[in-house]
Image (cartoon, helix red, strand yellow):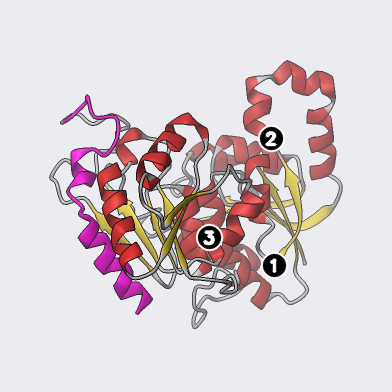
Amino acid sequence: MKVLLVKLSSLGDVVHTFPALTDAMAAHPGLQLDWAVEEAFAPVARLHPAVRNTIVVPLRRMLRKPLEALRSGEAGRIRTALAAERYDIVIDAQGLMKSAAVAALARGRRHGFDRASAREGLAALTYHRRHRVPEVEHMAVRIRKLFAAALGYSLDGRPADAGLVPGPETGAPYLVFLHGTTWPTKTWTRAGWRALAEQAGAVGLDIRLFAHGETERARAEAIADGLPNVHLLPPQRLETLAPVIAGAAGVVSADTGLGHLAAAYGVPTVGLYGPTDPRLTGLYGPRAVELKASRDCAPCEKARCRIAPEVTEGPPCLADISAADVWRALVALRA
């Protein structure tokens, strides 16, 4: 069976699709699955063993510069790649107008969420088959159900499995702190990260930090300052980030896509959630736990804190979570 999956972004959404691919691979031995995905996340999509090919769709870049995409022939190349094969089934697992438009360029019967289930209901009008999967469960569960309905198998007795193999233990055990995130309100305090690093150092654990851009690098340097067990790694591509995360003894993460990858690998992962609600799109994995803000104002789903608008890092809702809280949660996961 040949299947085209359309799931363009984001990093967390891509990772939340993995359990559905594992189901489909088990239900249909010999499955040939191609994935249409944003160029930034193609390296992550390729991590799953069910993926035969990735069709890179740089939609964000093309929408920013549409004339350039037309003049360069890039739009035509993508259209040709999507139509190169006839698929038995095309699954739009994103449910947006942009993903539906990409799916419509492919040859094959299109399946997706019905109008009440899709994130943008009009997208459902472009599918040949629509499946009702209400938005009352975690996105990973909903995508598993969508695949099962589209490909004709039951999920009864099938455990959720992201299909990723944890990294080998090489050298001394280490933790990864994923401190960088898109909103200032999603960040934890530098004092919290430092206190957690000190607790890890007391039991002989090193810390590895990634940083992209000046803001993240400044935070990482402040976390590492004077702590010999904290190591700031150079900027990484996703291809080299993934093995570092997969081989970690534990991960502590702000609400960011790499935290979802850690959870999918089965690495003990503690997620810190303040302004966002992890109920439908949080960490999904066998050894993951979320520490959520307890204030009445959370989750606010805001990029700027209304209680402390002057705070650019570590809003009150996340500052309430102590390093001791995080350490206890991590120790329990690693037990």
Residue at 38 percent across and 60 percent down: it is: 137
Give coordinates of residue 67: x percent, y percent. 74, 16
Nearest to the observer: residue 83 or residue 213: 213
Residue at 49 percent across and 78 percent down: it is: 159
Is label 2 in a helix, a strand or a loop? loop
- The residue that mark 3 highlights is 245
User: Does 322 appear in magenta?
Assistant: yes
Residue at 23 percent across and 46 percent down: it is: 318
Mark in the foreground, 3 or 1? 3
Pointer 1 local density, CA inside 10 Å: few below 14, some 14–19, many at least 20: some
Q: Is residue 86 above or below residue 307?
A: below
Distance CA(mark 2)–CA(mark 3): 26 Å
- The residue that mark 2 highlights is 58
Q: Which residues are magenta?
A: 308-335
Nearest to the observer: residue 43 or residue 249: 249
Q: Amino acid at mark 2?
A: Pro
Q: Is residue 79 above or below residue 332?
A: above
The disc, 2 or 3, on the residue closer to the chain's N-terminal end is: 2
Q: Which mark is residue 49?
A: 1
The disc, 3 or 1, on the residue closer to the chain's N-terminal end is: 1
